[in-house]
DNA sequence: TAATTCCCGACTGAATTACTCAGTATATTA
DNA sequence: TAATATACTGAGTAATTCAGTCGGGAATTA
């Protein structure tokens, strides 16, 4: 289990998808702009998420990415693991034999902590974050702001009603 | 909150200190040899741990490092934070203003996850790891092996009884 | 004094991060 | 059918961090 900015990017992007799930696919260009991450970098991250089945891509105009499963069945741990190349090597490289054939104490202790952490993050699903009332509130407010801006500066809609998902 | 190999090194080293706490200071040379980490690198990590008051150094022969506080009052979160330079910046750099003066949804959600994770790791203390019976068992066995080896190849003792702490 | 340990700072190769560019493939819409 | 918007792929790259080396110093013990 590893946790870095890369993992944070993946998690926040997935949360974005989860929030706008009902509005159809979200484009990486939107996420890139809203969260200030480079588009190509996002593409690399999403390639990994796609390999794990956490998202599915929809090509062509009006396309984007959708969650690969219901938000209630995607855990934070899965997201982080899929982008962070969870090579959690200890000194024995997984052989558990550095103490005269036995697993050493340090190995045991770290494995223990690591699995507790994983269990914790595996229990947190995307749904458990976005379904709380205060989140719904902020989400609604931002959509309102976004649609007001959209009214003042109407963009050419790729598909009717699809551009509201551009809120951050 | 960030979690990398560096953090793991710090945590396992601190666990080492906690286990051998009753036997006097543990030298970095011991930890370096047992856990396969470079001595100078350990020195850098311990400089940070010392700044946070998590350990205290004892100079001179027979010296080493001791826990700065009882193991029951040192959390895993503290250890990781002290070495990992927890600069958990979001896009707004902590200003919470990227959504027209308001904190954006992504910021809110990540802050939320981050604090939950911190709370979890802050609840885990060194003592909660080493005081479990199965750990005490492995610890005892390793000390036995170590003292048997010490009998076969007696090292020059820096201080009477102090070298048993060389077990991994 | 000599040995052992912590302590300090500068430097360095390797790995990873985050990004850029240049394309290809597929679906939509006009 | 043509134009366009999107996902996809892979090679390359500057910046950063990781992990380690080196060369000293300072305090303590014997
Ligand atoms: S590091 Fe795996 S057994 Fe020691
Ligand atoms: S990133 Fe902090 S408010 Fe948007």
Image (cartoon, coloured by chain):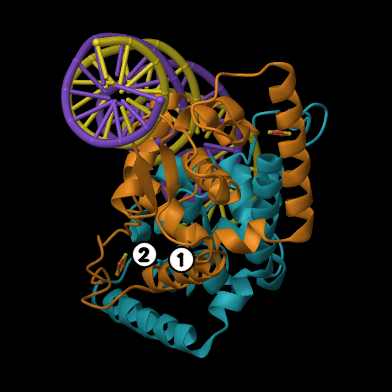
Chain colours: A cyan, B orange, C yellow, D purple
Residue at position x 33%, y 76% in the image: A146
Q: CA distance from mark 1 to mark 2?
A: 38 Å
Quarter of the rendering containing residue B141? top right
Image coordinates for residue B49, horizontal then vertical, percent: 37, 48
To the question of a shared chain for discs 1 and 2, the answer is no
Give A30 or B128, whichever is nearer the viewer.
B128
| Viewport quadrant of the C terminus of chain B | top right
Dividing the image into four quarters, tell me where ligand 2 lies: bottom left
Comparing labels 1 and 2, the label whose residue is closer to the camera:
1
Q: Which mark is residue A156?
A: 2
Image coordinates for residue A109, horizontal then vertical, percent: 67, 49
Name the residue tied to disc 1: B114
Give B37 or A79, whichever is nearer the viewer.
B37
Tell me the element at label 2: loop
Count of marks overlaid on the render: 2
Image coordinates for residue B136, horizontal then vertical, percent: 73, 53
Disc 2 crowd rating (10 Å Cα; few below 14, some 14-19, many 20+) is: few
Residue at position x 65%, y 41% in the image: A106
Q: Which mark is residue B148?
A: none
Question: Which chain letter goes with mark 1?
Answer: B
Question: Which chain letter goes with mark 2?
Answer: A
Q: Is residue A13 visible?
A: no
**Is residue A31 left or right of A153 when viewed as pictured?**
right
Q: On screen, C19 above or below A34?
A: above
| Viewport quadrant of the N terminus of chain B | bottom left
Q: Is residue B6 visible?
A: yes
Image coordinates for residue B143, horizontal then vertical, percent: 71, 38
Residue extending farthest to the right is A101
**Is residue B63 left or right of D9 when viewed as pictured?**
left
Tell me the element at label 1: helix
**Is residue A85 left or right of B149 when viewed as pictured?**
left
Residue at position x 52%, y 66% in the image: B117
């Amino acid at each position: 289990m590893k946790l870095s900015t890369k993992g944070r990017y993946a998690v926040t992007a997935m949360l974005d998808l989860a929030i706008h799930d009902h509005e159809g696919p979200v484009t990486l260009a939107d996420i890139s702009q809203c969260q200030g991450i480079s588009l190509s970098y996002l593409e690399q991250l999403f390639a990994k998420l796609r390999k794990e089945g956490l998202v599915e891509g929809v090509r062509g105009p009006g396309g984007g990415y959708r969650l690969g499963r219901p938000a209630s069945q995607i855990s934070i741990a899965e997201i982080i693991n899929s982008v962070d190349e969870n090579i959690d090597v200890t000194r024995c490289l997984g052989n558990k034999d550095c103490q005269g054939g036995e697993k050493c104490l340090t190995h045991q202790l770290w494995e223990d902590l690591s699995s507790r952490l994983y269990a914790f993050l595996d229990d947190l699903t995307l749904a458990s974050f976005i379904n709380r009332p205060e989140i719904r509130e902020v989400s609604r407010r931002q959509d309102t702001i976004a649609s007001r801006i959209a009214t003042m500066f109407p963009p050419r809609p790729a598909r009717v009603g699809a551009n509201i998902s551009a809120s951050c």
